[in-house]
Image (cartoon, rainbow, N blue to C red):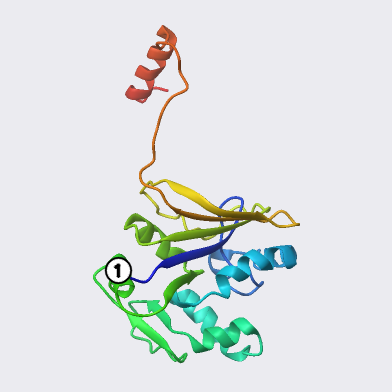
Amino acid sequence: MRKLTGAVFQSLDGVMQAPGGTEEDPTCDFRLGGWSFHFWDESLEKPFGKVIDSDYDLLLGKRTYDIFAAYWPNNQDQPIGAKFQRINKYVLTHSDEPLAWENSHKIEGETAAEAVARLKESDGRDLLIQGSSTLYPPLLAAGLIDRLVLMTFPVLLGGGKSIYDGLRDSGAFRLVESHVSDKGVVFGAYEPNGEVKTGTFATKEPSAEELQLREKIKEGAW
């Protein structure tokens, strides 16, 4: 079975919209495109290179596909551009618009999770999500993402697209790899680790005041 990795550039407040350029994705009046640019250096390229230089096919949402298809075919002089041109691009979309970029394939199912589960069961390279924020909630909920790579940049963007938009499911992860760049970008690779476990630091029975407060919370009076 193919493994699926999601690789995300995100701000401290979880925004992943348009990290690479000012005009990359200005939808919803987002005005801070290109926010990751000044943090890139050799110390960040090394851990990211382990992800982007590995062997994979791309899994994309339609908007990220459109962004990539408009840019990378004209930039094949860059190693990533040449690679993206060569590998398969699997696109989750309800649109009937043709996918003109070579080696592009539309995948379908009753749900995104169903379509991706079927793709993972097929023969081929492992899969990598780039961009495509809307794919994460359903795929995380279905347990289809085998590794989540978060590159967290030390900026607050105050709003924008996030992989957490609409996420309602919980789950625990374990850190399997980490790195901090010279400019403070935190690279963390995580793998699913079952359900979220809860507990309490309390060592005594709750006081009368605590019990009263709990009642107010239950009644919606707090």
Question: In this orientation, which residue lies closer to the viewer: 209 or 127?
Answer: 127
Give the image quarter of residue 119: bottom left
Residue 109 sits above or below residue 17 on the image: below
Residue 153 sits above or below residue 117 on the image: above
User: Which x, y percent locates residue 84?
Assistant: 53, 83
Image point (42%, 73%), residue name: 126
Image point (35%, 17%), residue name: 215
Question: Quick one: quadrant of the C terminus?
Answer: top left
Give the image quarter of residue 46: bottom right
Residue neighbourhood size for the residue with mark 1, other residues' Cα within 10 Å, grouped as few (<14), some (14–19), many (≥20): some
Q: Amino acid at mark 1?
A: Ala
Q: Give the farthest residue toward the left.
A: 110
Residue 82 sits above or below residue 174 on the image: below
Give the image quarter of residue 90: bottom left
Q: Secondary structure at mark 1?
A: helix
Image point (53%, 60%), residue name: 149
Question: In this orientation, which residue lies closer to the viewer: 104 or 119?
Answer: 119
Q: In the figure, is residue 102 to the left or right of 151?
A: left
Residue 11 sits above or below residue 127 on the image: above
Residue hosting label 1: 117
Question: Quick one: quadrant of the N terminus?
Answer: bottom left
Q: In the figure, is residue 124 to the left or right of 33?
A: left
Can residue 2 be seen? yes
Question: In this orientation, which residue lies closer to the viewer: 179 or 217?
Answer: 179
Can residue 60 be seen? no
User: Which x, y percent locates residue 62?
Assistant: 43, 76
